[in-house]
Image (tube, grey):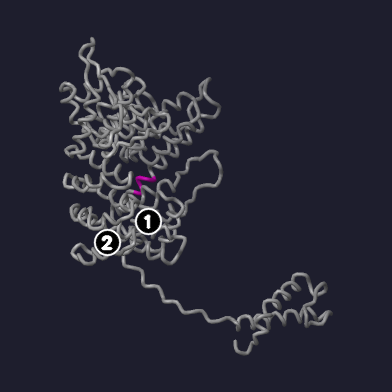
Amino acid sequence: MDRISARDRTSAPDVWEELVTSALLGTARRTPPGIEPGPEAPVALLDAAAVETVRRRAGLQAARAVQRPQQAPEDPRPELPAAAGRRLALLLADRPGTGGGGRRGTAPDLMELLPQWLAAANTHGYAAPPQLLPALLDAARGRTDLRPAALAFAGSRATWLARLNPDWRFALRATPGGGAALPPPQDTEGVQLLWEEGLFAERVALLAAIRARDPAAARELLATTWATERAEDRLMFLDSLRTGLGPDDEPFLEQALADRSRNVRATAAELLSALPDSALAARMAVRAGACVAVDHTQDTPTIVVEAPHECDAGMERDGVVPKAPSGRGERSWWFGQLVEAAPLGGWPGRLGGRTPAEIVALPVADDWRNELHAAWCRAAVRQRDAGWARALLGTPAAPEAGGPGAVSLAERAKLLGTLGSVERAEWVAGFIATHGLSEAFQLLGVCGVPWAAPLGRAVVDALNIARDAGSYPWSFSGVMGLAERCLDPAEAGRLEGLMAVPDEGEDASPGAGGYWAEAFQRLVTTLRLRAAMAEELEGA
């Protein structure tokens, strides 16, 4: 460096640009300064470029030495069976096609099986093969739905790698506290220090960890700084109380009803309404009960509704939002919120000792039926009340597949979520048997995997009926994709008869039989592949 003058260092980039330009244009058209034109000019250009290259390299200042990365943490979990490791490599090597549509053929969609494989591997508690971690993180980078299972499988090495590659930085954001180790419970000083001085993500992770282990300790920790927290942080911290929510949380939540933030007040009210013995639930029960009664003067006992005429300060404090959405009447808006927050267990006593099924079967005067039943639906979901959910769902064979209060497929799906997996599958199977697959996709999404035998049979039978009708299978592609991932692999043998191309009737769409045959061949192949994956993970 010292041998190159300041003038040379300043002009070096200009000299290099001249040499590059002359090399591109040719020395016959442009000769660099200091080189004689003529047949020897090209050689002189190369010599000058060599000298300039040395000058440029010599003029570079040495970079500051960086600290070598720490060694990756050990993963104490058992090693993945060899066959399962090879399968994971194949799943990660598969990439979704770039074509826009067209026939899928009979090959399974391996990327769609990756979430299921990861869930099973995590259930077994296996460690991820180190050589596959980069591909695993690349896959999770492109698909956010993969991230929770992929990062759980990758373990602490995922955050170690993420600190070395900015493309995988999502692993640091997805891991509470950025992968930082939380202090052990017995380290009270360390817990308090992290809570008071840690980053927000670290504090959220700390509170969630303590709440899962000791709900009271987490609540007490939150109370120490509650008054000084930002509104958006209070909301996030309050949401952590959903884990282990119980009667002991009521005093803290009652105080939160007076919070400065409307969102914090609303969340506190929602949590309190999920506690049927809370004071807020009792207040809501009185308000809602004053709005609903049974009129015995008519030929048939009928529910009558008198919605509130105002949203007073007490209602607003208890979480009732006063301003109705656009296009919604204020009184019906307030009424729905009151019924939604009132304990469902109080309605039989208020409405003549009737059961939930008898209550929802009563006629409702003045077009209040949908509003009342929809609010009861929301209450059943919030309070996880399976008895009311059954009553509101009704029988799956009911006209229009609707229970009294199930005003939409989304509502029915939420109600089904309160039932056990077997009962849920049986209800959806009855729905499909009566109404077919056209509206079943959303309901199938809440059923446990693999599907119970009655549900699996109902789906296959409905697909077979659609095939025999001669229509194209494309309108059932969503259900077929779910079947590939959710149908019990043991059903593969029963499906073999559907893999042949059926005879096409006069009204059949041209070529539809071939498409259906491909779809069933892909389904059978995928089911067999899932069975093989399960055996590999078992180490068989």
> Which is nearer the eye, 402 or 515?
402
Name, please, the residue furthest toward the bottom.
3
Residue 379 image position (x, y, % from top left): 26, 33
Q: Residue at x 44, y 58 (%)?
A: 135
Give the vertical position of 178 relative to 425 (above or below).
below
Name, please, the residue furthest toward the right.
38
Provide the residue designation for mark 1. Answer: 174
Contact between marks 1 and 2 (CB within 8 A): the answer is no
Q: How dense is the environment of label 1, judged by Cα within 10 Å: few (below 14), some, or many (20 and up)?
A: some
Task: Provide the secondary structure element on which disc 2 rests.
Answer: helix
Q: Which quadrant of the figure contains the N terminus?
A: bottom right
Residue 361 image position (x, y, % from top left): 25, 20
Residue 34 shown left or right of residue 512 in the figure = right
Q: How dense is the environment of label 2, judged by Cα within 10 Å: few (below 14), some, or many (20 and up)?
A: many
Q: Residue at x 15, y 25 (%)?
A: 349
Q: Nearer the viewer, mark 1 or mark 2?
A: 2
Q: Residue at x 30, y 59 (%)?
A: 203
Q: Quadrant of residue 281?
A: top left
Provide the residue designation for mark 2. Answer: 195
Amino acid beneath label 2: Trp
Residue 394: say if magenta: no
Residue 348 shown left or right of residue 117 in the figure = left
Query: What's the distance in space between the residues labelled 1 and 2, CA to CA?
Result: 19 Å
Residue 171 shown left or right of residue 396 in the figure = right
Residue 514 image position (x, y, % from top left): 51, 32
- Dominant secondary structure of the magenta stretch? helix
> Which is nearer the eye, 354 or 16?
354
Task: Provide the secondary structure element on which disc 1 rests.
Answer: helix
Amino acid beneath label 1: Ala
Region of the chain picked out in magenta, as a range: 529-533
